[in-house]
Each structure stands twice: as structure tokens, then as C-alpha cells.
Image (cartoon, rainbow, N blue to C red):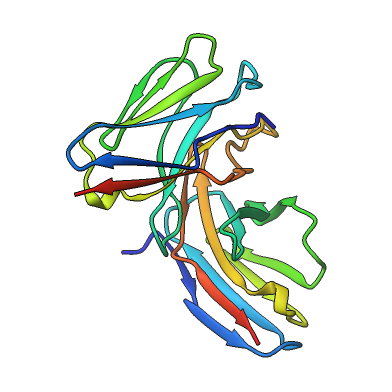
Amino acid sequence: DAKTTQPPSMDCAEGRAANLPCNHSTISGNEYVYWYRQIHSQGPQYIIHGLKNNETNEMASLIITEDRKSSTLILPHATLRDTAVYYCIVPPLISNFGNEKLTFGTGTRLTIIP
Amino acid sequence: DTAVSQTPKYLVTQMGNDKSIKCEQNLGHDTMYWYKQDSKKFLKIMFSYNNKELIINETVPNRFSPKSPDKAHLNLHINSLELGDSAVYFCASSQLAEAFFGQGTRLTVV
């Protein structure tokens, strides 16, 4: 499995952009980078995923470096509801089924400060 | 209209009992999973099923037996419950990229 490294915690002021880094230096050419988050007492929630190109959806943007060894999740205008643990995951390519083996590490605890 | 629903939400039981947790998804996904989140908040996959067939079994004790009667349901039966089984159990389903998780079942063994 491509191992990921994230800072244990970060703070961000409400309304500002939250930039969450992730290192995945052992990622292989066909492995995707996924981001999930877990708000307190809830199940994990999918945010975004990408392979090489930068991606954007209604929740966030994902910036992947050219060498693919690291990525940054950007929440453009953080709100108090974005306080959660954010997980960067690189699932192994086991079969054609997709991300059937998500391995959640310790993630980054993001606290949005009013 | 809940996408992935688990029942019960809370389960308190004595050591040695047998219990089941039910999971249903209405998303039409082929793949379903069970995850366990322990007291240290580590979230680990236990089982994965694709179209009712077991794909992943992550060295979970035999006391845990998943059952998938159809691709919309994946139930988890636990025999001879132990104190160490206390955790939050999450069911999830996916169709390729995005996995949807249920709200979790908090199991407490006393």
C-alpha cells in the first residue's frame, strides 16, 4: 500500500481557505489519491479523488504535484461545519472493483476557529 | 432517504452473547463493506463483499460472520462477544470511486 503522511492537527479561521497537505511518496503510477473526512460521531464522508490532474468539486479542490508524491486538499471558504478529521488515502489496486480497501490512518484533525 | 442505513445505532450487551448488526443500502451499489473504529479512532476494514461474494476478509476472528442475502444488504453477526469487541462498526457501499458510509453502530460489551 502507498503510505500517506499527514500532520496530526491544523487550525483555520472561519471563512479562510483550509489547505491540508498529504505526502504519498511511494504512490505508484495507477494509484489514485482519495480524501475523506469524518465529522464527530458520524461515518466518513467522501470528498474528492484524483490521479494526476487537479480536481475540483462542490466541496473542495485537490492539487496533486507533478511527481505525484504529495497533494493538498483545499477547502476554499472553511465554515465551522468543516471541523472534522480529514483522511488522505491511497488505496491499493487489488482488482477492478475500485476502492474496496480504504485504509484510514490517523488523518488531520482540522479545527475551524470562529 | 438514507443511502446506507444500519440498525441498531446503539447496542449494549453482555460478554458471551451473540448479536447482529444489519446494513442496507439503496444506492444500487455492487460493493459493501464493514469497518471497525476502535477507541483510539483507528478505522479499519473488516470485510468487503461484491455482489454477495466475499472479496476481503482482513484477519477478523471467526466469531465475526458477515452475511449478504442480496447485494443491497450486508449483515454482521458476532458470536461470543468479548470486551475487546466494543467499538463503532460502520457499514459502507461503493460503486468504484466514492464510498458511502452509514452512521455507525456503537457496540458496548459489558
| Front position in the image: A45 or A16 | A16
- The image shows residue A104, relative to residue B66, as above or below, that is above
User: Which image quarter is the N terminus of chain B in?
Assistant: bottom left
Q: Position of residue A94 (x, y in %)?
A: 70, 34
| Front position in the image: A76 or B28 | A76
The quadrant in which residue A26 appears is top right
- The image shows residue B103, relative to residue B18, as above or below, that is above
- The image shows residue B40, relative to residue A30, as above or below, that is below
- The image shows residue B39, relative to residue B53, as above or below, that is below
Q: Is residue B101 left or right of residue B108?
A: left
The quadrant in which residue A29 appears is top right
Task: Name, please, the residue furthest toward the top.
Answer: A66
Q: Is residue A43 left or right of residue B21?
A: left
Residue, x 56% and y 17% (percent of image)?
Answer: A69
Q: Is residue A103 left or right of residue A84?
A: right
Q: Position of residue B70 (x, y in %)?
A: 59, 63
Residue, x 75% and y 53% (percent of image)?
Answer: B58
Residue, x 26% and y 52% (percent of image)?
Answer: A81
Q: Position of residue A105 (x, y in %)?
A: 59, 44
The quadrant in which residue A90 appears is top right
The number of discs equals 0
User: Which image quarter is the C terminus of chain B in?
Assistant: bottom right
Q: Position of residue A5 (x, y in %)?
A: 57, 32
Residue, x 57% and y 86% (percent of image)?
Answer: B12
Q: Is residue A68 left or right of residue A62?
A: right
